[in-house]
Amino acid sequence: MDIDKVRALTDTELLTELVAQRRNLYDLRFQLATRQLTDHSQLTGTRRSIARILTVMTERNLDETQVPRPAPQARSATRSAPAKRAPRAPRAPRAKAETTTGKGDER
């Protein structure tokens, strides 16, 4: 993304684009680790795009921690509640290890 295009974005669009680019970088790193990435220049381009967005946000004095979060989706009514585990049986106490004095079986 060119710097002129980044400067043309609104504040909300900047934050949304930052989230999208960071997700893209995450996906590219995952592809790199699994040897599925064929065009390694995408990593550099994505990092530079993130840097451009952060530069414009700094110029506008925006806080990057104010990233808009998607609203939580309502749970489907067809889902059943998770099954509860059965309580564990109490553990038996451990037997104490016998100590030897090194002089045989004298007690």
Image: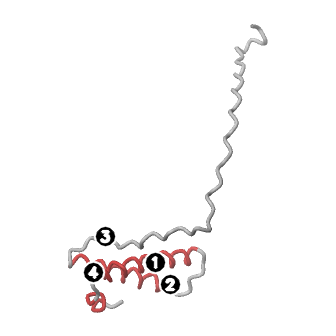
The answer to whether marks 2 and 1 mark residues whose Cβ atoms lie closer than 8 Å is no
The CA span between labels 3 and 1 is 20 Å
The residue labelled by disc 3 is: 66
Q: How is the image coloured?
A: secondary structure
Crowd tier of the residue under label 4, counting other residues whose Cα lies within 10 Å: few below 14, some 14–19, many 20 or above: some
Percent x, y of residue 26: 48, 74
> Which one is earlier in the sequence, the residue at label 2 or at label 1?
1
106, 93: nearer the viewer: 93
Residue depicted at 42% across the width and 76% down the height: 22
Q: Secondary structure at mark 4?
A: helix
Q: Nearer the viewer, mark 2 or mark 1?
A: 1
Query: Marks 1 and 3: in contact by CB < 8 Å?
Result: no
- Above or below 86: residue 40: below
Picture residue at 36% right of the left edge, 89% below the top: 1
Mark 2 or 4: in front is 4
Q: Which residue is mark 1?
A: 25
Looking at numbered disc 3 in the image, what kind of residue is underneath it?
Gln
Q: Given the current orientation, which residue lies at the most extreme front position? A: 77
Q: Label 4: which residue?
A: 11
Q: Which mark is residue 40?
A: 2
